Image (cartoon, helix red, strand yellow):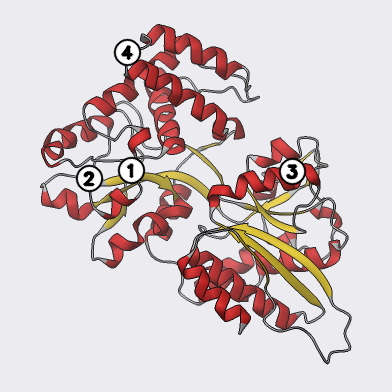
């Protein structure tokens, strides 16, 4: 009963929750139970199917009890930092790809999964496992791959008799027509907008923003290009200024598209699809002289890791293997986090005909493109905040383009 109440509460609250996933205490069992903890972030639907998966796990493993900690993304990262610093993190945890370099640059920040025989890593290719390797230690395993994708509400574009944009020029042409009704052809939150601007600057300059070893490759010229193009996008009503971006404006159809991760497709456009709108994963925006996909990057959607401080590595590994490879989790999760990388899970999804929908469409488009690997530096929240703080000074004419570019270039160098 307690667990059912938790599920009901989950539908109405994004607040941080901490509870045991077990519905009733063990009373009459002779088996010695081991308790482990598990933390993740997600929206209400993700929380619900994960809780259901844990119930099934506990039925399969009555000797293991799982205590769950989950929340929406906002707040999770701050709490996670505190837990990692105080060594109070969960035994099994969902982590962001960028955290590997932050918390385990030498490979010792998380438990080495290669040392746990309960982990069936053979379901993952060596290329996939490389994402979680640091100093030959397997710190984490990706659940699925992810890339920023351009989604469009085709229903809106059809109302204006406009083709779905493929190039930057296409977006500006759409803005000329849509802006009279206060509609932006595309939109983006801060991180998505930052990566979108990088894609443009790389295409326009023919240079990558970072070298292969993570050093800054852009000069003042390319940084200035990013600021000036951002100004143009905002002034000509192609996309809203990042500070004024509102997620709910997608539902209200003030935005005719959005940049979002593959794993966020349903989260961003689920309501529009329910309302009968046709949502498509468009081409990766490009210049006339470049191909779709140039300047764009892919990364693991999210990853699972085990705490280096766990006192129950065997039980933690059993749970982690279940989350990544079991048919039970495969059916419940489907492709909500992207197309799973486990070959065992892919077999289940094919058998159950679960490979369909906007998320699958976006995943297929991503897998058919040649992307570079996203360096975690480019996801640093402080770096992104610095960029848009300086960009605002430029937009509001507090600084000219050269001064703004010089200032941010100096900031950027401290992160590389």
Q: Using the numbered discs, state the Cα–Cα distance from disc 3 to disc 2 in whole angstroms.
A: 39 Å
The residue sitting at 32% across, 19% down in the picture is 395
Q: Which residue is mark 3?
A: 133
Residue pointed to by mark 1? 283
Q: For this view, does 378 lie left or right of residue 254?
A: right
Within-10-Å neighbours for mark 2: few <14, some 14–19, many 20+: many
Q: Which mark is residue 164?
A: 2
Cβ–Cβ below 8 Å for labels 1 and 2? Answer: yes
The residue carrying mark 4 is 397
Q: Which mark is residue 78?
A: none
Disc 4/disc 2 C-alpha distance (Å): 33 Å
In-image side of 207 versus 90 (left or right): left
Alpha-carbon span between mark 1 and mark 2: 9 Å
The crowding category of the residue bearing disc 1, from other C-alpha atoms within 10 Å (few below 14, some 14 to 19, many at least 20), is many
* Foreground of the two, 1 or 201: 1
Residue 289, placed above or below residue 123: above
């Amino acid at each position: 009963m307690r667990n059912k109440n938790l599920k009901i509460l989950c539908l109405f609250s994004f607040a941080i929750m901490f509870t045991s996933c077990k519905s009733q205490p063990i009373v009459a069992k002779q088996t010695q139970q081991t308790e482990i903890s598990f933390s993740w972030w997600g929206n209400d639907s993700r929380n619900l199917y994960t809780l259901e998966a844990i119930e099934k796990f506990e039925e399969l493993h009555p000797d293991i009890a799982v205590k769950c900690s989950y929340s929406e993304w906002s707040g999770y990262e701050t709490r996670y930092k505190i837990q990692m610093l105080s060594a109070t993190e969960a035994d099994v945890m969902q982590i962001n790809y960028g955290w590997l370099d932050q918390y385990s640059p030498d490979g010792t920040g998380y438990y080495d999964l290669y040392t746990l025989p309960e982990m069936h890593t053979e379901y993952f290719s060596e290329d996939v496992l490389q994402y979680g390797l640091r100093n030959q230690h397997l710190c984490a395993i990706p659940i699925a791959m992810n890339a920023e994708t351009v989604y469009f509400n085709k229903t809106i574009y059809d109302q204006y008799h406009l083709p779905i944009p493929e190039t930057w020029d296409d977006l500006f042409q759409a803005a000329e027509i849509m802006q009279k009704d206060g509609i932006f052809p595309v939109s983006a939150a801060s991180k998505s907008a930052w990566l979108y601007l990088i894609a443009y600057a790389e295409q326009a300059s023919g240079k990558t923003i970072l070298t292969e070893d993570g050093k800054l490759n852009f000069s003042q010229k390319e940084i200035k290009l990013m600021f000036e193009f951002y100004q143009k996008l905002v002034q000509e009503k192609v996309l809203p200024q990042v500070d004024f971006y509102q997620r709910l404006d997608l539902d209200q159809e003030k935005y005719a598209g959005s940049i979002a991760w593959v794993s966020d497709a349903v989260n961003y456009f689920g309501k529009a699809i329910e309302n009968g709108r046709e949502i498509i994963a468009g081409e990766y925006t490009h210049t006339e002289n470049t191909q779709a996909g140039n300047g764009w990057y892919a990364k693991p959607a999210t990853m699972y890791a085990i705490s280096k401080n766990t006192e129950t590595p065997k039980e933690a590994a059993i749970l982690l293997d279940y989350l990544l490879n079991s048919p039970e989790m495969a059916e419940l999760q489907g492709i909500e986090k992207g197309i799973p990388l486990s070959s065992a899970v892919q077999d289940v999804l094919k058998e159950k005909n679960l490979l369909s929908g906007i998320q699958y469409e976006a995943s297929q488009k991503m897998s058919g493109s040649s992307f570079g690997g996203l360096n975690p530096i480019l996801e640093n929240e402080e770096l992104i905040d610095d960029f848009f703080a300086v960009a605002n000074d430029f937009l509001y004419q507090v600084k000219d383009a050269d001064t703004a570019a010089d200032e941010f270039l100096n900031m950027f160098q401290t992160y590389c």
